[in-house]
Image (cartoon, rainbow, N blue to C red):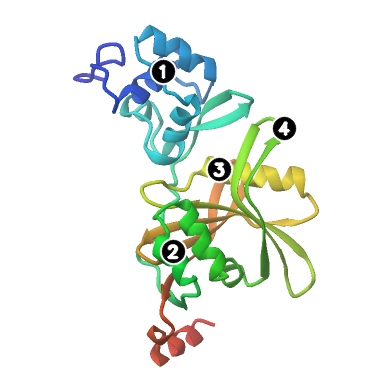
Amino acid sequence: MAGQLSAEERPITSQNRYSAIIEAIFSAKYTVGQRAIDFEREDIVTFAAKLNIALPKNLGDLIYTFRYRTELPASIRTTAPEGETWIIRPTGRSKYRFVLVTDVPLIPNANLAVTKVPDATPGIIAKYAFNDEQSVLARVRYNRLIDIFLGIACYSLQNHLRTTVTGMGQVETDELYVGVDKSGSHHVIPVQAKGGNDRLSRVQIEQDIAVCSEKMPSLICRPVGAQFMKDDLIALFEFEQQGDDIRVASEKHYLLVSPDAVTDDDLARYRRRL
């Protein structure tokens, strides 16, 4: 676009080298009208050398950054048709694909009502917890928020499940729960958690659904996202797949408070929600 420097022309700094590399990969492979563009991890090495940029110590961090931490560069985003956006999907071991999808950010609805929950987090955990995904997972686990949100009995099965999925390669789920409902049906609940400036990603949700389908096909898959909004306020989402899209099936916001902070007025209001 007019007024913008290309990846080759822009001065390279530690802040923009990831952008320069991903821009160069996209630009070299993209033609107008394309909706999917394949590339490999080795392309990161190739284009870093062409741009005379020092390679990241962890090549995977470049992909992670544009999936979960920040938007793709403007030069890539502006090629997407109105109402769509580019994402990066895994397609196998060290293989990826830029794909155009409907632009629906997975962010908390600021207008949603808040539900107070007496905070059952052990004091020593609360004292030393960080504002990251591990802190979110700990708060969710100690306060049984998955049970409350989904209305079933849930049990944490494994943290940081790393496995492989056909057509995707290696994937990771932050925490995996299993649950049982009042009819006796069994559920599998993959949970993705985000704190700080990280954000929930549809790619992770797609991977979670694929893990459930391939590894536990007889269980009901209920993919969940957990997002720190501020302090002790946690947004929980349940997702479902509709065709090629990931949609929010339900969303609730839970505020962890001391027991005496849940007032009679609060309880009366919650009863009216039933």
In contact (CB < 8 Å): disc 3 and disc 1? no
The answer to whether residue 266 of the structure is visible from this angle is: yes
In contact (CB < 8 Å): disc 3 and disc 4? no
What amino acid is labelled 1 in the image? Leu
Image quadrant in which the C terminus is located: bottom right
Circle nearer the viewer, 2 or 1: 1
Nearer to me, 27 or 136: 136
What amino acid is labelled 4 in the image? Thr
What amino acid is labelled 2 in the image? Ile
> Image height check: is 15 above or below 8?
below
Image quadrant in which the N terminus is located: top left
Q: What mark, if any, has residue 55 been given in the picture?
A: 1
In contact (CB < 8 Å): disc 2 and disc 4? no
Query: Label 1 neighbourhood size at 10 Å, few (<14), some (14-19), many (20+)?
Result: some
Query: What residue is shown with label 3?
Result: 204
Q: Position of residue 3 (x, y in %)?
A: 19, 20
Residue at the far left in the pictured view: 3
- Alpha carbon distance from label 2 to label 4: 33 Å
Q: Position of residue 148 (x, y in %)?
A: 57, 72
- Alpha carbon distance from label 2 to label 1: 36 Å
Q: Which secondary structure, mark 3?
A: helix
Q: What mark, if any, has residue 166 been given in the picture?
A: 4
The answer to whether residue 243 of the structure is visible from this angle is: no
